[in-house]
Each structure stands twice: as structure tokens, then as C-alpha cells.
Amino acid sequence: MPAKVYYTNLRTNSKAGLLDKLERLFKEAGLNQVVDEDDLVAIKLHFGELGNMAYLRPPYLRRLVQIIKKLGGKPFLTDANTLYVGSRANAVDHLETAIANGFDYSVIGAPLVIADGLTGKDYVKVPIQGEHFQEVNIGSAAHHADAMIVMTHFKGHELTGFGGTIKNLGMGLGSRSGKQQMHSDILPRINQDKCTGCTKCMRWCPAMAIAMIEWGGNKSGHVSSIIEEKCWGCGECIVTCTFGAMKPNWRTTPEAAQEKIAEYALGAVQGKEGKVGFISFVMDISPDCDCVHFNDLPIVADIGILASTDPVALDKACVDLVNSRPAQLGSVIEGLPAGQDKFKAVHPDVDWEPQLIHAQKIGLGTMEYQLIEVGSV
């Protein structure tokens, strides 16, 4: 049976604003049934890296918190620490970043809890039946919550093609050690002829796996070089390089990393059957992840908000909607017509479909869906 995915466009009027449409979408999708009286409800989101402006707007979270409180739940905002060196690699920096980006208690009305603790070591080993893992390291605050609402900004991603609900769950709630496990199939490669020797990638590398070497190719000077035995494969250097010198190079296959993320997503919802709901915002569809400290012009125009209790169907519906639209004027894929794969155009080295195929295979959800439009309030 196809899963039900509910959708509302971004048209509003004097009787129904976007926050009202979000609340109706929540109810129509049956997400109110996820929350029971006195439930500790984890709201999983991405707080955004400092400098990035494409992350979810705080008023959406404030309305969601109000909805959950009306249902008798006790909501808190959460995400796990990052593997890379940025503004969210430990709980102190992470919380300061979240507050700077507008997710303060005084704004949202709910506390912030970093899922895997101060330094990423507060996690639970969750048993699963996967092809890559038999157990996964999930941030303890999310694991111990009674229910969870996953709020996702749908966008492109340099390692998975697109970043949707599966990645938000799997990579997002994996502890720092879990993130390292998921990234282990990726080893960046460097086109030294394009490298300018700016050292930015070296400064952002969490594993100190980049060195500067003398280069005698088509230019003289120093360029970056990967120290393979140190590399974690986090991909931070790929998104940091603005000269196109860094590209992903898969140790095994591109599919392996996506499959690992899907298995971590399965672990993130383990034990919460019937207690997890998913909402995806298909707007500000930037080419890269919100983890980077900037955001480029969206690749297509804003589309709407979708919700479901099936994360796989939700991701499939979102990617289908994006690909059904023409590329936005001035974007990195300007001129690409409706019906063409927008994410493959942005990240030609990445096929995004394996994450959906594997997620369906391991029982996380189904790619078959029925799209149901929710109108105005």
C-alpha cells in the first residue's frame, strides 16, 4: 500500500497564514496521534551553521511547540554534535549557535538539549538488523524521548545528492562516533591544478588529515594533499573549497555511505513505532547542506510543506516535486528544464536514489506514496 504524504503549498490569505497551514497539515497528516499526555517529545531539526541562512525559520518551531503543548506533550529541540570542525562540534558551541540563529527558549518556548551530550560521547548503542551495522550509536536524548517530530529543511547535499528526512534522522542523530562510521566510505580527492593553496580546507579538517605540499604541475607553489591514513571522510573539505579542487572519492561505492545513513535512521526511530512524525519544508532549496557556513541561491523556487508518518515516502515525494520544477533563474543549474534531475545536475558524482532503495529494503518505509493536498484553513 502506498504511504500517505500530505502537502500544502505556500499560498496564503488574510484567513490563513503559513503557520496556520502548518498546523492544519500537522493534524491532517495524523501527527497529533504521535503525542500523548506527558510525553517527552524530541523535535529534531538542524540549527544551521553560523553564516548559513537557509535553515528553518524559528517561528515554524514556535508554532510546533505550541501544538505539542496543547496535546499535553513536553517538547524540546535537539540535534547531535557534528563531526567536522565548525560551530556545532560540541554542546557549548552548538547551543550558542542555535541561540544566535534564533532558537532561544524565549523565542521558541522549549528548551534545547544536544542529543549526544557535551562532546558527542553521550549515546546509546541501539541494536538493528542492517547490512552494514548490527548496532548504531544514537544520541541518548533523542533515543530516550517518548515521541519525536522530525523537522527537515529539504535541500541539496554534496555527499548524498539531497538532504532530506533520512539524512536528518540518520546523520543528524548519530553521535560523533556514529558520524565517523557513516562517513568511512568517503575519501576526498584533490585536483591540485585547481588548488590555490589557500589552506582553508586544512583549517576546517577535524582529523588534521590535510597537508600542504610543493606542487610542480602547471603552476608553482604549495597545494593541499590528503593524508589518507588520517582521513575520516567527513567531506568538510569538499564543501569548504570554493575553487572546485575537492571532489568525493568513494573507498567502496557511493551507495555504501547512503545505506549506512539509512541504517542509522532506522536506529533513530527504533522503539518509537507509531510515535514519530515527519515534516519537510521544500523551500530555500539550496544546492548544499545547511552544515556549510553559507548558502547559495535556491536551485528551484519554493514549493511547499509536506508531512507524513513515513520518512521514505516523504523524501521521495519531496525529490519528485523538486525535479518537476524548472531550475531557478540565476542558480547554479540555470536553464535546466522541468522534469530533469536537479540534484544530479548540482552534484554529478552522486546518485541520490540508493538511500531510498536501502531504506525501503530495511523496513524504514516505502517509496510508493499518495500525495494529498491540504488547502487553506
Image (spheres, rainbow, N blue to C red):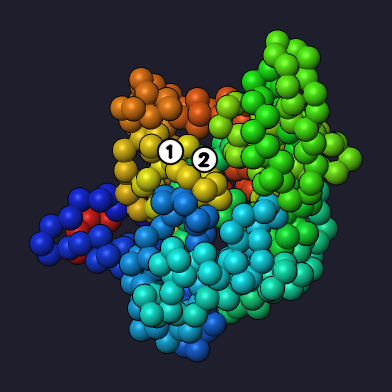
The residue tagged 1 is 296
Q: What mark, if any, has residue 288 been given in the picture?
A: 2
Image height of 4 relative to 71, above or below: above
Q: In terms of image quadrants, where is residue 15?
A: bottom left
Under tag 1, what secondary structure? loop
Pointer 1 and pointer 2: residues touching (CB < 8 Å)?
A: yes
Comparing 69 with 249, the one in front is 249
- Furthest toward the bottom, the residue is 38
- Furthest toward the front, the residue is 221
Comparing 287 with 50, the one in front is 50
Under tag 2, what secondary structure? loop
Q: Is residue 251 left or right of residue 106?
A: right
Q: Where in the figure is residue 107, as x and y percent of width and height?
A: 36, 75
Q: Where in the figure is residue 352, as x and y percent of width and height?
A: 59, 35
Say what amino acid the circle numbered 2 marks. Answer: Asp
Q: Where in the figure is residue 229, as x and y percent of width and height?
A: 89, 40
Q: Is residue 178 visible?
A: yes
Comparing 363 with 141, the one in front is 141
- Disc 1: CA contacts within 10 A as few (<14), some (14-19) or many (>=20): some
Image height of 291 relative to 257, above or below: below
Say what amino acid the circle numbered 1 marks. Answer: Asp
Q: Earlier in the sequence, mark 1 or mark 2?
A: 2
Mark nearest the camera among 1 and 2 is 1
Residue at image coords 66%, 61%:
89
Q: CA distance from mark 1 to mark 2?
A: 8 Å
Residue at image coords 70%, 14%:
219
Q: Is residue 51 left or right of residue 347?
A: left
Quadrant holding the C terminus: bottom left
